[in-house]
Amino acid sequence: MRVHVVSDVHGAADALARAGDGADALVCLGDLILFLDYADHSRGIFPDLFGVANADRMVELRTARRFAEARALDRELWAGLDRRDAIERAVRKQYAELFAAFPTPTYATYGNVDIPGLWPQYARPGTTVLDGTTAEIGGRVFGFVGGGLPTPMHTPYEVDEEEYAAKVAALGPVDVLCSHIPPALPELCYDTVARRFERGSTALLAAIRSVQPKYALFGHVHQPLVARTRIGRTECVNVGHFNHTRTPWALQW
């Protein structure tokens, strides 16, 4: 059995269409949408609406953790515009391309920048969406936990710690624990390019220590200080920033 795993697709529909080649199934750990590409500021919903110069400024402010100024710039740019309508139209366009690229079968959960309410309109037969639930793939139980925890970024699918922990607890024993965000270990949460810690989950960390799945797979941190480590018997793996690598991580048994 061979399963390919991707995370942080961020608009890479062309590469996503090839991500299942040679695999029995594809697992996607979310962040399909590209709002603003920190490596190429000309790509994404934000520069399409407001231009590259404003994208440069927004990245500069966020990278410097000047979040109050970033929010002020955001309010200035959106003044007089229907934010909800503009974003939904752009997201729908990306979702139509991305969901059409998923191979069969695909098992997917949400990232923190995704909009779960739109997924049922685009997920085709052969794509199973899971969040706080499990699926058996090749005789192994995979548990899925989507979304992220609250941050100053206020991304679309952030849930409070209690709700997130309840989703983790609902899984029970699993062989492979799949989430968008990492467990709360500093070395897994630090982004060496953004120079900041991303939010990791203490509930995931507790579940790994208690259940000891064979693997804990996640993404979210694009340039992690450490891409993989062990917690007891569990191999913890950041499967990579797919928008950059264009290469899935392979799990074989």
Image: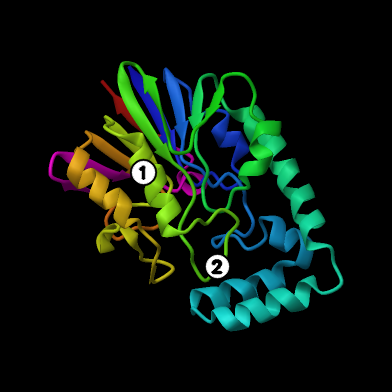
The amino acid sitting under disc 2 is Met
Res 101 quadrant in image: top right
| Nearest-to-viewer mark from 2 and 1 | 1
Question: How many numbered marks have been drawn onto this rendered protein structure?
Answer: 2
Horizontally, residue 242 falls left or right of residue 59, namely: left
Q: Which residue is at the far left?
A: 232
As helix, strand or loop, the secondary structure at mark 2 comes to: loop
Rendering coords of residue 114 (x, y %): 59, 48
Range covered by the magenta-colored residues: 229-248
Residue 227 painted magenta: no
Q: Which residue is mark 1?
A: 168
Instruction: Please tell me which of labels 2 and 1 falls first in the chain.
Output: 2
Residue ID at (58%, 82%): 68
* Colouring scheme, one of rainbow, by chain, secondary structure, one colour: rainbow
* Viewport quadrant of the N terminus: top left
* Residue 232, placed above or below residue 221: above
Q: Residue at x 29, y 41 (%)?
A: 216
Mark number, residue 204: none
231 in relation to 143, above or below: below
**Does residue 23 appear to the left or right of 228 in the view shown?**
right
Q: Residue at x 67, y 81 (%)?
A: 72
Q: Who's the residue at 39% across and 71% down the image?
A: 195
Binning the other alpha carbons within 10 Å of mark 2 as few (below 14), some (14 to 19) or many (20 upward) gives: few
- In-image side of 143 versus 91 (left or right): left
Relative depth, front residue between 143 and 193? 143
Image side of residue 54 versus residue 233, left or right? right
- Reading the image, the residue beneath label 2 is 153
